[in-house]
């Protein structure tokens, strides 16, 4: 069974950067990053496929980038110029046929 594990979160100051990792135990064609900010529903952030198709939420394109290293079964989310409103729990999941949500990785951006 496919398993995904998120890592790389932490506490960073406004304007800082973080790179999140989503590691799977096997190659997954399409993986998306999501986030849930305080008081909000979980939202889609970015997607990557093994065919090098990528897409990032329009409002985040100037600061977030997604990439993958299939030799490591890992999808990355590079986040630059972080803002306090980016604070939340970040998750990755397969799409379609999503798996049960993992614990995610907490990102906290201080002002």
Image: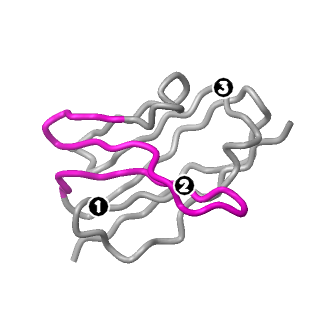
The residue singled out by tag 3 in the image is 81
The number of discs equals: 3
Q: Position of residue 61 (x, y in %)?
A: 47, 27
Q: Is 58 left, or right, of 67 in this rendering?
A: right
Circles 2 and 3: CB atoms closer than 8 Å: no
The residue singled out by tag 2 in the image is 35
3D distance between C-alphas at marks 1 and 2: 14 Å
Disc 3 crowd rating (10 Å Cα; few below 14, some 14-19, many 20+) is: some
**In the image, is residue 36 part of the stretch drawn in magenta?**
yes
Q: Residue at x 67, y 43 (%)?
A: 86
Q: Position of residue 90 (x, y in %)?
A: 55, 55
| Residue 27 position (above or below residue 71) | below
Residue 94: mark: 1
Q: Which one is nearer the viewer's eye here, 1 or 89? A: 89
What secondary structure is found at the residue carrying circle 1? Answer: strand
The mark that comes first in sequence, 1 or 2, is 2
Q: Quadrant of the N terminus?
A: bottom left
Q: Which one is nearer the viewer's eye here, 64 or 6? A: 64
The mark that comes first in sequence, 3 or 1, is 3
Residue 21: mark: none
């Amino acid at each position: 069974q496919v398993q995904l594990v998120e890592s790389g979160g932490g506490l960073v100051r406004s304007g800082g950067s973080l790179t999140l990792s989503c590691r799977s135990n096997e190659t997954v064609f399409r993986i998306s990053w999501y986030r849930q900010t305080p008081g909000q529903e979980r939202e889609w952030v970015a997607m990557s496929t093994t065919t090098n198709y990528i897409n990032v939420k329009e409002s985040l394109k100037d600061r977030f980038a997604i990439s993958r290293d299939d030799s490591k079964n890992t999808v990355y989310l590079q986040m630059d110029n972080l803002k306090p409103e980016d604070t939340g729990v970040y998750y990755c999941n397969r799409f379609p046929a999503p798996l049960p949500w993992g614990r995610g990785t907490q990102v906290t951006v201080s002002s």
